[in-house]
């Protein structure tokens, strides 16, 4: 094994922290502009997230406040997407990544999402010094988002590594592992306890990771055996 590619959201850090970071920025803006309680606004958004998902939280919040307009919704969306997040890696990320580098494994990231948003996350997490290549699939074109094979192949080409010599580590079987499996890469799903989603247990074999672990530290013996 010569290289490992990692997903970003909910693999290296908890994405809910990014969401709440964005909500805090929105709450600060609305609270200051309309003289509203910022903590109450944050609580309302978190509750809407838990009940309704992420689809139209700002629309619903502004309707509830009697402040809805398309202009204000668009402003909140842009504020959320462009903010500099306060987020942190999982505790097992740095020790695992350092160990992999020490044994000669080259490291990369392949991540979906709006490129500007993902790059803000990468900057906030100070990841560039740890990784040899970082691919935001959005920078290759929206059609190159997972499960497209293109971002994975681009990362491997930059690392000058063949697919059978590489591993992909992610958390979402609905899109993370289909292409790496087809390419002949080793695949590992990190299924943390807080990620309680029954959909992850009902995916077809072609989309399933070869190994399932509960933390990043558990991938080390798998890779050492194959290195």
Image (tube, helix red, strand yellow):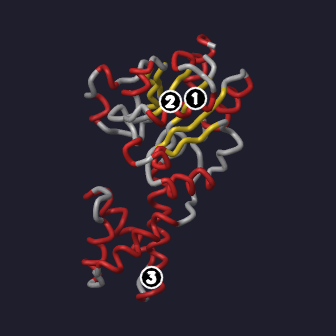
Residue under circle 1? 157
Disc 3 on helix, strand or loop?
helix
Q: Position of residue 223 (x, y in %)?
A: 59, 18
Pick the quarter of the image with the N terminus: top right
Image position of 37 (left or right of 49): right
| Residue at the image position 48 percent from the left and 19 percent from the top | 186
Q: Position of residue 17 (x, y in %)?
A: 49, 54
- Furthest-right residue in view? 102
3D distance between C-alphas at marks 2 and 3: 46 Å
Other residues around mark 1 within 10 Å, as few (<14) / some (14–19) / many (≥20)? few
Image position of 209 (left or right of 109): left
| Residue at the image position 32 percent from the left and 58 percent from the top | 54
Q: Position of residue 58 (x, y in %)?
A: 33, 70
Pick the quarter of the image with the C terminus: top right
Q: 198 above or below 17?
A: above
Is residue 9 visible in the rendered structure shown here? Answer: no
| Residue at the image position 25 percent from the left and 58 percent from the top | 52
Residue 3 location, quadrant = top right
Q: Are marks 1 and 2 in contact (CB under 8 Å)?
A: yes
Residue under circle 2? 153
Disc 1 on helix, strand or loop?
helix
Q: Are marks 1 and 3 in contact (CB under 8 Å)?
A: no
Disc 2 on helix, strand or loop?
helix
Q: Which mark is residue 31?
A: 3
3D distance between C-alphas at marks 1 and 3: 48 Å
Is residue 27 visible in the rendered structure shown here? Answer: yes
Q: Position of residue 203 (x, y in %)?
A: 27, 27
Camera-nearest residue between 119 and 156: 156
Badge nearest the viewer, 1 or 3: 1
Q: Which of disc 3 and disc 2 is earlier in sequence? A: 3
| Residue at the image position 44 percent from the left and 82 percent from the top | 31
């Amino acid at each position: 094994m010569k290289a490992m590619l990692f997903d970003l959201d909910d693999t290296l850090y908890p994405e809910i922290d990014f969401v709440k970071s964005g909500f805090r920025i929105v709450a600060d803006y609305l609270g200051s502009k309309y003289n509203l309680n910022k903590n109450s606004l944050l609580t309302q958004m978190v509750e809407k997230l838990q009940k309704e998902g992420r689809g139209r939280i700002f629309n619903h919040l502004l309707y509830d406040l009697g402040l809805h307009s398309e202009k204000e919704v668009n402003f909140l969306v842009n504020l959320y997407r462009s903010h500099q997040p306060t987020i942190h890696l999982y505790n097992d990320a740095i020790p695992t990544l350092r160990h992999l580098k020490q044994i000669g494994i080259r490291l990369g990231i392949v991540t979906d999402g709006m490129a500007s948003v993902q790059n803000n996350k990468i900057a906030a997490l100070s990841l560039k010094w740890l990784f040899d290549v970082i691919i935001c699939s959005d920078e290759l074109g929206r059609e190159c988002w997972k499960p497209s094979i293109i971002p994975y192949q681009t990362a491997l080409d930059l690392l000058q590594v063949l697919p059978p010599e590489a591993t992909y580590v992610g958390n979402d079987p609905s899109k993370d592992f289909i292409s790496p499996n087809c390419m002949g890469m080793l695949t590992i799903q990190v299924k943390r306890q807080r990620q309680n989603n029954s959909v992850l247990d009902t995916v077809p074999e072609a989309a399933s990771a070869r190994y399932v672990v509960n933390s990043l530290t558990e991938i080390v013996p798998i890779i050492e055996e194959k290195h």
